[in-house]
């Protein structure tokens, strides 16, 4: 079945094709106004969302389709009364595609295994491929190309965005350095690093994990950070994590170590004074709102790609 679960399962050619499509969707939205006419997307949410829900629902509507929001806390699956297999098979009889935003990556895999329609991973604790595809689109848009550019990521190395960035950058020839604390619990998972390294050998990219923020920033075309307190993190650990990540906060001084024309990215939500300072996220190098907007165009492109509707638009 034709799914998007992680970027490791998409070829570099397919990633490039969907980025091209998203850029075209952004340039020519009227050409896609009826591309999903008569089609329905089910959106299953176990984790809360602003950008994921609104961008998928708006994108589906703008292309003539219909999106259904389903809160899993109100569902039999969420209450432990219905199997993932039954949920997947029943939804497949009703809708044309499923987007799910879940805690467990294992459950996402089960959903995809049993569904008879395309399944899109809108986020799990392990991966966030739709976000990173929009990020790659944004870098292409701002920098002209991905291959040979340098991205430096700062903060929590062991989260879904970092893991998807590692794979997405490695598969598209974008050099990536992850600057994080020297602590296995806060560094990228070894299995993901192995996958990224294998992809990088084929694309010519480099993959580095470093514990010096300044070293990672030098020569970077893209400076990227993410929340220090993801949805699944216990709030009681906030002070501990702030102490660990403070040396990796993106400040104006750190931005000056990157290339003069470097862009700043954060997938949002963001807290000023935490993962970045206000002068950075609100400054002239920040593209965070363009990045957020591009979720809409990329999500349209993902739906078109998976549903075979890109041709002829």
Image: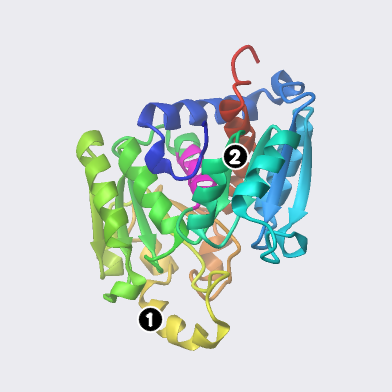
Residue at screen point 78% across, 31% down:
65
The residue shown at (79%, 27%) is 64
| Residue pictured at 73% horizontal, 60% vertical | 76
Residue 188 seen in render = yes
Q: Does 290 appear above or below 59?
A: below
Which quadrant of the structure image shows residue 78?
bottom right
| Residue at numbered disc 2 | 115
Say few, some or many: other residues with alpha carbon within 10 Å of mark 1 (under 14 / 14 to 19 / 20 or more).
some
Closer to us: 268 or 118: 118
Q: Quadrant of the C terminus?
A: top right
Total numbered labels: 2
Q: Residue at x 60, y 48 (%)?
A: 85
Q: Tell me the distance, in whole angstroms, between the alpha carbons under discs 1 and 2.
A: 41 Å
Measuring from the top left, give residue 82's x and y in whole percent: 68, 57
Specify whether residue 138 is painted magenta: yes
Q: Is residue 258 left or right of residue 3?
A: left
The residue that label 1 is drawn on is: 244
Residue 218 rendering spot, x and y as whole percentages: 27, 57
Picture quadrant of residue 253: bottom left
Magenta segment boundaries in residue numbering = 128-139
Where disc 2 sits, the SS reads loop
Left or right of residue 29, residue 201 in this image: left
Q: Nearer the viewer, mark 1 or mark 2?
A: 2
Secondary element at tag 1: helix
Of helix, strand and loop, which mostly describes the magenta segment? Answer: helix
In this view, the residue in front, 129 or 221, is 129
């Amino acid at each position: 079945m034709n799914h998007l679960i992680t970027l490791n399962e998409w070829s570099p050619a397919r990633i490039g094709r969907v980025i091209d499509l998203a850029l075209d969707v952004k340039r020519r939205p009227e050409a896609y106004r009826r591309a999903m006419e008569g089609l329905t997307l089910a959106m299953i949410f176990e984790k809360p969302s602003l950008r994921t829900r609104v961008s998928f629902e708006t994108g589906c509507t703008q292309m003539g389709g219909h999106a259904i929001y389903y809160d899993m806390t109100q569902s039999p699956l969420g209450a432990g009364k219905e199997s993932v297999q039954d949920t997947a098979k029943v939804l497949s009889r009703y809708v044309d595609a499923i987007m799910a935003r879940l805690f467990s990556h294992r459950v996402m895999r089960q959903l995809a295994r049993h569904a008879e329609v395309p399944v899109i991973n809108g986020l799990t604790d392990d991966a966030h491929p739709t976000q990173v595809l929009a990020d790659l689109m944004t870098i292409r848009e701002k920098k002209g190309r991905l291959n040979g550019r340098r991205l430096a990521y700062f903060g929590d190395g062991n989260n879904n965005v970092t893991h998807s960035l590692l794979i997405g950058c490695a598969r598209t020839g974008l050099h990536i350095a992850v600057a994080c604390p020297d602590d296995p619990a806060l560094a990228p998972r070894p299995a993901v690093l192995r996958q990224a390294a294998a992809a990088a050998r084929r694309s010519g990219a480099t993959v580095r994990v470093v514990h010096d923020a300044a070293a990672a920033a030098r020569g970077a075309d893209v400076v990227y950070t993410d929340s220090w307190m993801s949805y699944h993190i216990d709030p009681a650990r906030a002070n501990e994590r702030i102490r660990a990540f403070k040396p990796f906060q993106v400040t104006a001084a750190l931005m000056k170590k990157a290339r003069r024309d470097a862009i700043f990215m954060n997938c949002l939500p963001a807290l000023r004074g935490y993962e970045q300072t206000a002068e950075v996220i609100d400054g002239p190098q920040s593209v965070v709102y363009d990045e957020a907007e591009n979720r809409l165009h990329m999500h349209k492109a993902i739906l078109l790609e998976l549903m075979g509707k890109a041709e002829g638009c």
